[in-house]
Amino acid sequence: MAPFPFPEGLRFGIHGGQQYTDFPACVELWQTVEELGLDWASVFDHFMPIQADPTGPCFEGPTLLAALAAHTHRLRIGIIVVGVTYRSPAVLANIATTIDHVSGGRLEFGIGGAWRSMQVIGNPARDSSPCRRCLCPRCCLCAK
């Protein structure tokens, strides 16, 4: 099927969550989206389900993104926001490089302060200040 004739600059895609599902269903969704002519697809970077029971199953974002990249050919792919506090800058840069190679250069890479990281590591505080303070230095390290 040919892609929809969207005006230049206007792009459509999906943000498909990776919670409460299995890998074959994720592949089927992304391949269907690609066949329909949409432009991009993304996953999230949370270690637990969001807006649902947090004890349920949830795939890790970058790992799933790499696997889905290998099962698609045209879609721009990405994670809406990669939490900078979840991984060291060197590991994060290597992950992005690997996914970009696996996808044939289709990765869209965005990073942010990971406001929920305090909850993931067991601190109930919702203050995202520590995350925001470490964002700029980590962005600089990832860009090098």
Image (tube, rainbow, N blue to C red):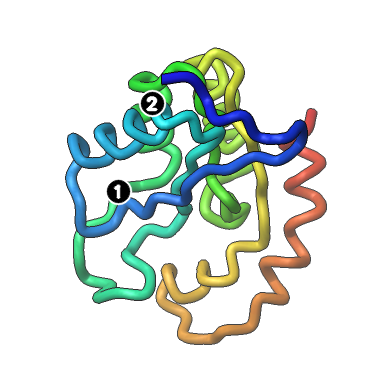
- Whether residue 122 sits left or right of residue 91 in the image: it is left
Tell me what residue is drawn at x 33 percent, y 33 percent: 32
At label 2, the amino acid type is Glu
- Height in image: 31 above or below 25? above
Q: CA distance from mark 1 to mark 2?
A: 24 Å
Determine the image quadrant of residue 52: bottom left
- Height in image: 86 above or below 56? above
24 and 63: which is toward the camera: 24
At label 1, the amino acid type is Phe
In the picture, which quadrant includes the C terminus? top right
Number of labels in the image equals 2
Determine the image quadrant of residue 142: top right
Q: Mark 2 highlights which residue?
A: 35
Q: Mark 1 highlights which residue?
A: 59
Q: Residues within 10 Å of mark 2 (few under 14, many from 20)?
A: some
Inspect this view and state whether residue 66 appears.
Answer: no
Picture coordinates of residue 99 (x, y %)?
51, 25
Tell me what residue is drawn at x 73 percent, y 35 percent: 7
Q: Residue furthest front?
A: 5
Q: Which of disc 2 and disc 1 is earlier in sequence?
A: 2
50 and 5: which is toward the camera: 5
Of helix, strand and loop, which one carries label 1? loop
- Height in image: 103 above or below 9? above
Picture coordinates of residue 75 (x, y %)?
51, 27
Picture coordinates of residue 116 (x, y %)?
52, 71
Tell me what residue is drawn at x 56 percent, y 33 percent: 39
- Whether residue 143 sits left or right of residue 91 in the image: it is right
